[in-house]
Image (spheres, helix red, strand yellow):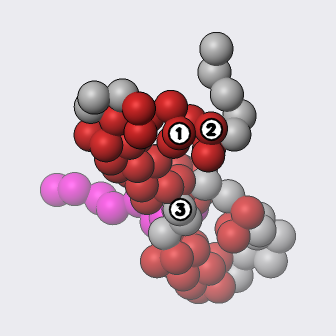
Amino acid sequence: MVTQNPLSLLDKLSKHPRGLELAYLVYQLHQDSQRQTQQDIRLVAIALSLAKRQGIKDRPYFKGMANDEIRKWIDRHSPKQETT
């Protein structure tokens, strides 16, 4: 049975022979997922700068968007580079 109470989970882990190792692994996974979901403020700055340079007045609220969404918006609105 999966519990919703973190303290209860830690109590159960403390009784397991490898509980400390398991708790550390879960902590590391949690930290990694947090890093992946945190918005990159540099992307917001790039998108805002691009919108300003191009005079886009009806731009989305970038701070409410995920990094991948901001990257897609930047790609769609960036001037295309011609290769020779």
Gap in angstroms between the C-alphas marked 3 and 2? 28 Å
CA neighbours of label 1 inside 10 A, class few (<14), some (14 to 19), many (20+) = few
Residue at screen point 67% across, 28% down = 3
Residue 8 is marked as 2
The amino acid type of the residue labelled 3 equals Gln
Residue at screen point 26% across, 40% down = 21
| First-in-chain label (1 vs 3) | 1
Residue 61 x %, y %: 77, 68
The amino acid type of the residue labelled 2 equals Ser
Residue 38 in the image: above or below residue 49 = above
The amino acid type of the residue labelled 1 equals Asp
Residue 3 in the image: above or below residue 64 = above
Q: Do the residues labelled 2 and 1 touch (CB within 8 Å)?
A: yes
At mark 2, the secondary structure is: helix
- In the picture provided, is 78 more to the left or to the right than 26? right
Residue at screen point 46% across, 48% down = 30
Q: Name the chief secondary structure element in magenta.
A: loop
CA neighbours of label 2 inside 10 A, class few (<14), some (14 to 19), many (20+) = few
Q: Which residue position is annotated with label 1?
A: 11
Residue 35, image quadrant:
bottom left
Residue 50 x %, y %: 56, 77
Mark 1 against mark 3, which lies toward the viewer? 1
Q: Which residue position is annotated with label 3?
A: 38
Gap in angstroms between the C-alphas marked 1 and 3? 30 Å
In which quadrant is the N terminus drawn? top right
Start-end of magenta stretch: 74-84
Count the labels in the image.
3
At mark 1, the secondary structure is: helix
Residue at screen point 73% across, 63% down = 64
Residue 48 is marked as none
Residue 16, image quadrant:
top left
- Of residues 78 and 41, the one nearer the viewer is 41
